[in-house]
Image: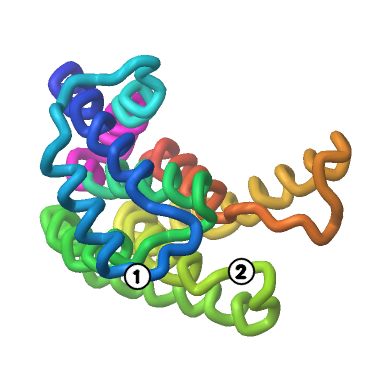
Amino acid sequence: MLALLAVLGLVAGRYVRTLAGAFGPDPADTRAEARAALRSVLRTVPVPAWPPAFELATAAVTVLVAWRAGLPYVYFALAGTALAAIDWRTTRLPDVITLPSYPILALTLLSTGELPRALLGGLALAALYGVLWLVRPADLGLGDVKLAGLIGMAAAALSWQAWTVAALGGQLLGALYAVLLLVTRRGTRHSQFPFGPFMLLGALTALCLGR
């Protein structure tokens, strides 16, 4: 099963590469951009490109999450990889990916028997990030708030301990990266950087800890 998931991850990684490259930092028309992204994905040949960085990363995340958390979390692993790649390139988390992921993730988590807890966890983490956004809107985007709901759902379905790790892990990893920028003099205290990838790394850590 893990070998099959590795192959699935390699194929999906090719689409992740296409999707990540289809979004820009400041589009004039987000709907037109989404339609163009969909057309690009539909035209993509599922053969890994060279160098296969996206493909290998997607395969590794997919296998790791399925092994440690279970098959219901595979969709979250794929969507999270795509969102992390897009946010790192563009400092955006497109609604066209984030918002449809809510019902899709809810359906995939239905088999865990923990959907009520997942929904509560998603609401709680989205609310927490919503408060942070109100306090410091210059440092946190609404895209991060929407992403927090997805992370909260996935982590809470596993356990409240995983939810706590995911909630704190993203903040800790983001803070460590900010310190690294200061130490290496590649940034200042006012430097901006995409926060979504660190939130997703925190979620990956939580899911890899298992139950």
Q: Earlier in the sequence, mark 2 or mark 1?
A: 1
Between marks 2 and 1 in the image, the one whose residue lies nearer the viewer: 1
Inspect this view and state whether residue 55 appears: yes
Magenta residues, start to end: 60-74
Percent of width and height locating residue 51? 39, 16
User: Which amino acid type corresponds to the residue marked 1 in the rendered image?
Assistant: Asp
Percent of width and height locating residue 134? 62, 84
Find residue 140 and name its label. 2
**Dominant secondary structure, magenta:** helix
Q: Depth check: give the residue in front, 61 or 211.
A: 61
Find residue 29 and name its label. 1
Outermost residue toward the front in this view: 28
- Total labels: the figure holds 2
Q: How is the image coloured?
A: rainbow
Inspect this view and state whether residue 125 appears: no
Percent of width and height locating residue 193? 65, 53
Contact (Cβ within 8 Å) of mark 2 with mark 1: no
Which quarter of the figure has residue 99?
bottom left
In this rendering, would 139 be left or right of 202?
Answer: right
Q: Depth check: give the residue in front, 122 or 115.
A: 122
Find residue 58 and name its label. none
Residue 83 falls within the magenta-colored stretch: no
| SS at badge 2 | loop
| SS at badge 1 | loop
Percent of width and height locating residue 176? 73, 44
Residue at (62, 76) in percent of width and height: 132
Check the picture and name the quadrant holding the N terminus: top left
